[in-house]
């Protein structure tokens, strides 16, 4: 199982960071390994998403439930293939001109092969993901 937690101070407003992370259908323009995301709002604070991934020759898709409290947190959960379990949480807390952003992920894959591949690049991809969000914030200001 891959586990990762990070906390960062980002020079951007809390509401803008929240909106950027929640805009999952825009992820393919930020992350080359995400081919497509189809999201459907199910209630005021939740949506279902289908995520299409390509990692080299490995190609897979999964569905997840995204729940959130506006400008405070976003939870992502999936128990569908390729995962045994996926749990991820973003938190946002304004502190002066900066926003404290927390990110935690736990991912357990059904395939040992996929788990081995993902675990080799997991931490760098999570850092890449967060850096891209930060860069998007700086460019948007």
Image (tube, helix red, strand yellow):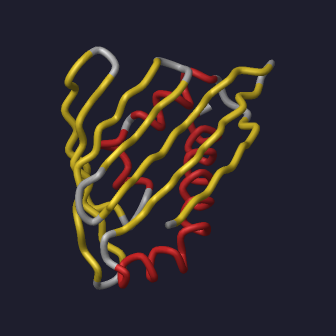
Question: Would residue 39 be found to the left or right of residue 86 on screen?
Answer: left
Q: Quadrant of residue 44?
A: top left
Q: Could you tell whether 31 is left or right of 133 in the image?
A: left
* Residue 39 as seen in the image, left or right of residue 74: left
Q: Is residue 120 above or below residue 123?
A: below
The residue depicted at 78 percent of the width and 21 percent of the height is 95
| Quadrant the C terminus occupies | top right
Question: At which x and y percent is residue 83?
Answer: 32, 62
x and y percentages locating residue 134 in the rendered image: 63, 45
Number of numbered discs overlaid on the protein picture: 0
Query: Which quadrant would residue 94 be assigned to in this image?
Result: top right
Q: Position of residue 41 (x, y in %)?
A: 22, 26
Q: Identify the residue shown where x is 72% and y is 43%.
A: 7
The outermost residue toward the top is 44
The residue at 61%/69% (across/down) is 124
Image coordinates of residue 8 in percent, x first then y, are 73, 42
**What residue lies at 62% left-to-right and 23% top-to-bottom?**
14
Residue 25, placed above or below residue 29: above
Q: Which residue is more in the foreground, 35 or 141?
A: 35
Out of 111 and 42, give the one closest to the viewer. 111
Q: In the picture shown, does residue 128 fall above or below 63?
A: below
């Amino acid at each position: 199982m891959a586990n990762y937690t990070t906390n960062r101070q980002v020079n951007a407003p809390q509401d803008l960071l929240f909106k950027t992370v929640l805009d999952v259908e825009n992820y393919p323009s930020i992350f080359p390994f995400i081919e497509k995301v189809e999201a459907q709002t199910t209630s005021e604070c939740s949506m279902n998403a289908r995520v299409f991934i390509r990692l080299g020759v490995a190609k897979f898709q999964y569905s997840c439930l995204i729940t959130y409290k506006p400008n405070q947190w976003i939870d992502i959960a999936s128990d569908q293939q390729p995962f045994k379990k996926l749990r991820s949480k973003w938190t946002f807390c304004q502190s002066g001109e900066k926003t404290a952003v927390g990110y935690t992920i736990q991912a357990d894959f059904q395939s040992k092969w996929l788990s081995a591949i993902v675990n080799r690049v997991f931490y760098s991809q999570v850092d890449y993901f967060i850096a891209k969000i930060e860069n998007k914030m700086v460019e948007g200001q």
